[in-house]
Amino acid sequence: MDLHAALSLGLPLGIGIAAIGSGIGLGLIGQGAMQAIGRQPEATAKIQLAMIIIAALAEALTIYAFVTMFLLSGKI
Amino acid sequence: MGLEFLVRVRRTALISGGLLSLMIATYGRLPLGIAFAAGVAWSLINLFLLEQLIVTLTGADRRETSSWLRAGTSLAGLLLLFAAGAWTLSHLSIRAQLLGFLLPLGVIVLKALSTVTLQSAAWRAITASRWRAAAIVSVLLVAAWWIVPAVLHGARAEDAPDVSTQQAETSHQATAHGEQESGPQKFPSVITVLARAYPEAGWARFLDRNEAIAFALLVAFILCLVCFVATRNPQMIPTPLQNALELVVEGLHNFIAGIIGEKYAPRFVPFLGTLGLYIWLMNLFGLLPFMDSPTSSLNVTFALGLIVFVYAQWIGLRELGPLGYVDHMLGSPRDLTGWLLAPLMLPIHVLGELAKPISLSCRLFGNIFGEDMLLVAFVSLGITCLASLHLPFGLPLQLPFLLLALLTSTLQAAVFMVLSTIYFLLMLPHEDHDHEEAHSHSATPAQAH
């Protein structure tokens, strides 16, 4: 397998794998936040703020894979 | 005009000389920058020693032994300086050193000129009216716009013989351009269009290369203009624009104060709020037709991340003190376990600090760039769908993603701002932070009931 084939196979797969991880993480964050809001509706604003921050942190991992793909996609 | 003038000249020359030598070392060659810095340093020390010598020789206490001693040391310093100058002249580039040597003298001339003009009647006549000053500034700008290229062309015509190198350069640029085009393409912006229309013009190529910076400056300018217009004539019953801005600023203040605490809010809200607003506008700017988000370039986002990083370290050093800063980096060890873990905590903390600007900038860049790419992909998909009909438009498949782009733009600006706030908060002293937490813990059961 030469470099081009490896890159064109590996880059989309890498993003997909990263997205699986982020997706699981986002799902757990959303579940936790929804439960918390359900228990304590008056704290919705605080919970949403924390949820958004943590969701951004979880989502960033996929974005890193995405950036890597764009850095390497010139070599395909 | 006296010794205080010389002190100011020294400070200006020191700052500008340092910046200029850094620029020369970065954009030119390193030895040239070092030579320039050596020239500036030599010139400054020379001026300082001469000043000392003259002050001691003409001062009131010139008959005493201490002043003789000081004059002697100044003379010896001058001799040493000449020896050092001879050494540097024989080892470093003479032209750069000469330029550096002339810099403090140039600063003196400019400062003297400015003091003379500022006191003259002509200057007062010009600055009496705002419009007259603006007119003269614009005339000067236009003149510079015409004169500088003419001078540069003249200089280029003088060393015309090496056409071959120029050709090689252009062909190299052409290949570089071709490589750029093969990568993923964004929507064309005004600057891209201009660069395509005038591929030979220097200014178009310059703008094209610094596209992100040009748009970032444009956004900053718009922000400044809006704020200036809104706050020019503040009133108790606000005009609509003033009202809107007050709403935004108050919202930002409450939001940040909710995280960082009311005590520090007045200090950090101006910086953090500006950061959030600026990034938000830059993100949204790419959604305008023929505009481009500056934040879809890693250079801009990394610069923003670097600013936050440096400011956070500065806050840590200021608020905790140098010892407290090291203590913070060691994980604030207070007992035996803490000290045993300190060698482990130090690299973790240092790496964590270094990772912050990288993660901040990569997150912003990736989101905005990805959003742009998504729009491009769906626009081209919409065009391909209708390609067989030969229509001058495509299906508007990108519309739902425009709404998504609005959401991500706002969210990413907020995330950048919130994370910067939290990085600052982590650097601030922990006592009242803990106190606040305890307070909120005690408040929670009351809220639950």
Image (spheres, coloured by chain):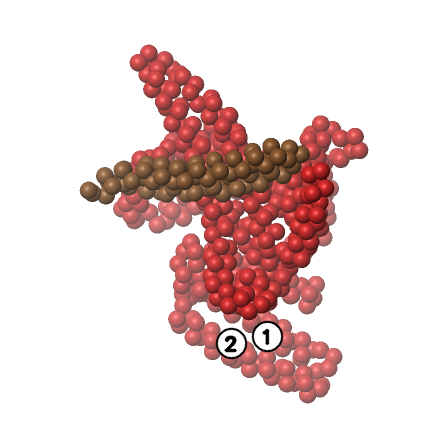
Q: Could you tell me if residue B46 is visible in this image?
A: yes
Residue B81's tag is 2
Is B24 in front, or is B159? B24
| Alpha-carbon span between mark 2 and mark 1 | 10 Å
Q: Which residue is drawn at 40% across and 28% down?
A: B376
Q: Which residue lies furthest to the bottom in this view?
A: B65
Q: Chain B is drawn in which colour?
A: red
Residue type at numbered disc 2: Leu
Left or right, B287 with respect to B429, comes to: left
Left or right, A40 with respect to B216, comes to: right
Q: In x, y percent, where is residue B345?
A: 50, 61
Query: What is the chain letter for disc 1?
Result: B
Residue B394's tag is none
Q: Which residue lies furthest to the right in this view?
A: B236
Q: Mark 1 points at which residue?
A: B49
- Label 2: state its secondary structure: helix
Q: Which residue lies furthest to the top in this view?
A: B389
Q: Which residue lies furthest to the front in this view?
A: B449
| Quarter of the picture holding the N terminus of chain B | bottom right
Is B139 in front, or is B288? B288
Q: In x, y percent, where is residue A66?
A: 39, 39
Determine whether label 2 and label 1 are within 8 Å by CB: yes
- Depicted B84 relative to depicted B124: above or below: below
Q: In x, y percent, where is residue B205?
A: 40, 38
Is B380 in front, or is B6? B380
- Label 1: state its secondary structure: helix
Residue type at numbered disc 1: Leu
| Quarter of the picture holding the C terminus of chain B | top right
State the brown chain. A
State which quadrant residue B51 falls in.
Answer: bottom right
